[in-house]
Amino acid sequence: MEYEELFARTELLVGKESMKAIASKRMILFGLGGVGSWCAEGLIRSGVMHLTMVDPDRVAPSNINRQLPATTQTIGQLKVEVMKNRLLEINPFVEIKAVPQMYSEETSTSFHLETYDYVIDAIDTLQQKAHLLLMASKTPATVFSSMGAALKIDPQQIRVAEFQKVKGCKLAAALRRHLRDKGKPVKPILCVYSEEHYPNKGTTIEKNKNDFFRREKTNGTVVHVTAVFGFTLTALVIQDILSKCDTPPFNAKQ
């Protein structure tokens, strides 16, 4: 099997030079949950050849409803390793780096963001996400980010906007508040988001360490929303690469 066979249909659509451009770019993706895992799959199936994936977590039963690496057979395994094995089965020629580590202010310099063409954020924790967006915006890399995909059920309401213009998303609003004293991203960052707010209709009750019952605060999610968030991130990356190719102009009128 040759590399060209794997992406023949994509090459028919975008051309050989565009495929070379996609294959040449170096990308780092933070977060392999309900959004990031589908983004990783989309990137590799689109012809990306250099991908670093960062996530410290192991597969849990609660991941199975929406996360690509999560099955009953992978519970307890590192998400980055499960995904790496899967992606190498899709394209054995690809260069995959799996990093089972959390991004934080303390670990940020170890990722060398300045060495990548694209930084893709699918982190769901506020402080780490805010720091990543701020630091990544200071590098030459193009940055794309996912806002909150929980409490959504209609993928037709998913949109893309620049970070400062995202509306109706509590995570985006919280990020902007958090960054007021730390500084705004120094360049535009396109974000995937939805203004939809579909309230939780169920409750999860479990015991805590003191054997008292508590109400779980985790918000509900569904795969047909998180996956579309992830694939939209993939689309932003691929469209950006195509828009910079000389022939044919990606934005040419047909």
Image (cartoon, rainbow, N blue to C red):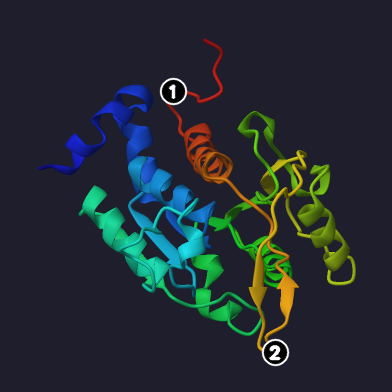
Secondary structure of residue under mark 2: loop
**Disc 2 or disc 1, which is closer to the eye?**
2
Front residue of 240 and 56: 56
At x 53%, y 39%, the residue is 224
**Camera sees residue 96:** no
Can you tell which quarter of the image residue 175 is in? Answer: bottom right
Front residue of 194 and 136: 194
Q: Is residue 87 left or right of residue 191?
A: left
At x 34%, y 37%, the residue is 19
- Could you give the CA–CA distance between mark 2 and mark 1, rounded to whole angstroms? 64 Å
Secondary structure of residue under mark 1: loop
- In the figure, 253 relative to 170: above or below? above
Can you tell which quarter of the image residue 232 is in? Answer: top right
Where the N terminus falls, by quadrant?
Answer: top left
Q: Position of residue 38 (x, y in %)?
A: 46, 48
- In the figure, 251 relative to 225: above or below? above
**Mark 2 sits on what residue?**
210
Front residue of 34 and 133: 34
- Label 1 CA crowd tier, 10 Å (few <14, some 14–19, many 20+): some
Q: Is residue 5 left or right of residue 174?
A: left
Please state which amino acid type lies under the numbered disc 2: Asn
Q: Is residue 169 left or right of residue 146?
A: right
Please state which amino acid type lies under the numbered disc 1: Pro
At x 64%, y 62%, the residue is 124
Query: Residue placed farthest to the bottom in the image?
Result: 210
Q: Position of residue 254 (x, y in %)?
A: 51, 10
**Camera sees residue 159:** yes
Front residue of 207 and 86: 207
- Label 2 CA crowd tier, 10 Å (few <14, some 14–19, many 20+): few
**Mark 1 sits on what residue?**
248
